[in-house]
Amino acid sequence: MKTAQVNEDKIVIKEIEDIKFDGRKGAIVRVLGCGLCGSDIVKFREKIVHNGAVLGHEIVAVIEDIDSDTNFKKGDRIVTSHHIPCGECVYCKHGNVSMCEHFKSTNIRPGGFSERVYVSDEHLKNVAHLIPDDMTEEEISFYEPLGCCVRAIKRCNLIDGDKVLVVGLGSIGLLMGEGIKAMGYKVYGCDLIEDRIELGNKLGIESYNSKDLDTFDKIIQGKCGGIDAVFMTSGADKAIDVALKVVRKGGKILVFSSTPRNSGYPNNEIYYKELTVLGSYSPSPKDLEDSFELLTSHKVNVKGLTTIYPLEKIQQAFDDTISNKILKAYIKVS
């Protein structure tokens, strides 16, 4: 079967043996397609993974063979996530499921950028869903990334009337903004790319250019008197400056990206403004259930956010994403 593998500074297509059960329960699925996640980009650019690694986890697939205690059957079109927490460790008990060692050890194999994947019975029982007939594979591929956003919104413990700013309107920022809006909060957005600002406004996220930070701060102060929570979905250093500038005293900053500036933190701003700064990473099965409901009820609209590439052009998908030519790549595998 074909796989797309990391090879130094390239992604190359290689043939490997078809994946098998090897005595394990679960399903062998034919991958229809897989979304290209920002974490895939980071792993590739920063050389975090070894040569031969198959990236990709936002899969949409059809079950080809199954040995499972679930009600799934051959021919079912499913979407699944790639990690499952144990529910019993200190991390799970404190709500930090993505820090759970079992969570980190579970995965789809060999990876989503592959013609076939093994999905364990544990995945089928906890994080897989049958795709409704009225959902396209591109739309439902946002199941796991939207689950990440749902978790972040929950972690921020917003209250009625809170005003939220999303800094960075890439695909995850737009998804975050839509999720915040769908969950009942007033949401603003900002970016430096005009096309993304325009798209944010079309999606109901009141969006602005943050190039002139003082002017942007005046706009925000005039609109709502200050932001209760800032969601940093951009990895640019500028995002930190925006967040610290507009968040109200006693407000929150939710970090949902890695940034180049990693040599320290703004101690005085956090201290004197009594800010709460927190991070959020990956979703729990309940977050994924909520994501599935938001997508299938069409409360979150993801139409038009993806650009489709065949597996053979996956390197171009990586390049176009890195250069901001597109918002989100969906790799069509079969």
Image: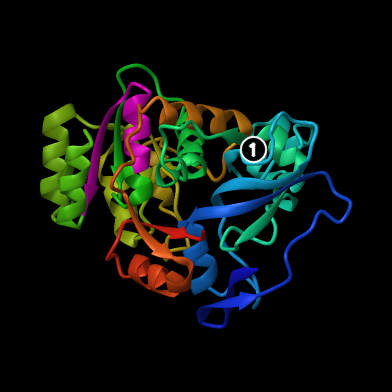
Residue 312's x, y, as percent? 47, 73
- Membership of 163 in magenta stretch: no
Left or right, residue 242 beside residue 141: left
- Residue 263 visible in the shown view: no
Callout 1: few (<14), some (14-19), or many (20+) C-alpha neighbours within 10 Å?
A: some
Residue drawn at x 69%, y 73% is 16
- Membership of 185 in magenta stretch: yes
- Residue 270 visible in the shown view: yes
Residue 79's x, y, as percent? 56, 41
Tell me the element at label 1.
loop
Amino acid at pointer 1: Asn
Is 292 situated above or below 316? above
Residue drawn at x 10%, y 47% is 215
**Front residue of 143 and 50:** 143
Q: Quadrant of the N terminus?
A: bottom right
Magenta extent: 175-191
Residue that mark 1 sits on: 96
